[in-house]
Image: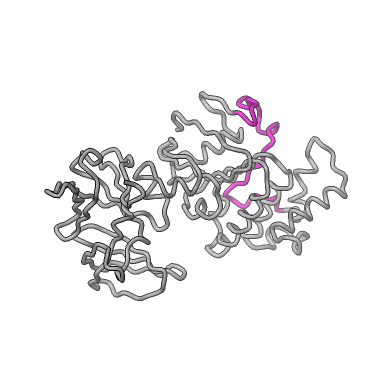
Amino acid sequence: MLRDLSLDLEAGSFVTLLGPAGSGKTTLLRILAGIEKPDSGRIFFEGVDVTALPVQKRNIAFVYQQFINYPSMTLFDNIASPLRVAKKKYAETEIKRKVAETAELLGLSGILQHLPEEVSGGQRQRCAIARALVKESRFIFLDEPLANLDYKLREELRADLKQIFRERDGVVVYATPEPIDALTMATHVAFMRKGEILQYGEVRDVYRNPAHAAVGSYFCHPQMNMIPCSMENRESGESLLRVSQELAFEVSLDRQKLPSDRYLLGIRPHHLYLADPLNRMVPFQANVELAEVVGSNTELHLSHDAVRISLLMQQVERFPVGKKVTAFIDPDELYIFDSETGTFVIRTGNRFK
């Protein structure tokens, strides 16, 4: 169920609806496309109220998560099908030109005479996307189109889609639970949770300035660490954010800015290290619970005083489970959130004081 939701999408934007399963992404996408009707509220396309307009009369294209193609038709005829049923009559030469141009964009030129069952899953999904693009619709909606593809194919299609949609003047709305999709492709992101949009804005701004702990934690790859801490005052006037007896951070913020006794510390995994050559970071002892090699990176899952902390290394290394390590946290890269409401309070670092 969607609640009190308002969104204004700019022409030329690639908007990602991001959030976990059940957050309302697909429902919102289907309402925007006209597949479902809202119980209340209005939808406008370029200033025109389309709330009551059936999906067939909207200038839209929709790409589903499943590889939806006509199995008895070649890829060429699949891509051409929207043009052949359009109100505007296209000459066959025009259809061939448009299909050829779209197929070239998506790397399908050499297999247009194949049936869908004769090509790979990635090629079938490219065909479904090509069928949406060939219509030259002003509004394109994509519902987790990369979900059923393997890692390598998703990576390839991300790069292709980013390039293709960069040159379009309409609006692209893309629903996904994957933060990396938004980080690598989108111009704007709307983070959704339980039918609400917690934050909307340009990708860079939302990533750098999360308005809520849920946004900060989820919109990060790997997810941002959220560590409970207590607030202590020192005679010097500085504040001390304490995670454990060993791990605490001095922050040059007065009590008025941090009036509560409990907070959540948000720390991105790539702001933790296993060395401190500049001798400015805060050290702590931890045990390795799991070491995952992901591509050319290593994700270390650490345990410190019953607190779970993730660290991202931009190199491949092996760590046995149970190994004791000294890790370091950059004190200028801490996000502080209210422990009860999750709302953002302040970030450390000179430029944020």
- Where does residue 194 sit, x and y in percent of width and height? 40, 37
Residue 200: % across, % down: 47, 40
- State the predominant SS element of the stretch in magenta: loop
Relative horizontal placement of residue 64, taking residue 107 as reference (left or right)? left
- The colour scheme of the drawn protein is one colour
Residue 255 magenta: no
Q: Position of residue 228 (x, y in %)?
A: 23, 50
Residue beneath the point at 43% across and 67% down:
294
Nearest the eye: 253 or 218? 253
- The image shows residue 213, relative to residue 286, as above or below, that is above
Q: Quadrant of residue 124?
A: bottom right
Residue 42 picture quarter: top right
For the N terminus, which image quadrant?
Answer: top left
Out of 54 and 68, give the one closest to the viewer.
54
The residue located at (64%, 50%) in the rendering is 166
Total number of numbered discs in the rendering: 0
How far across and down, in percent of the image, does residue 22 sit? 44, 42
x 18%, y 46%: residue? 231
In magenta, the rendered stretch is 44-71
Tell me if 136 is positioned left or right of 300 in this view: right
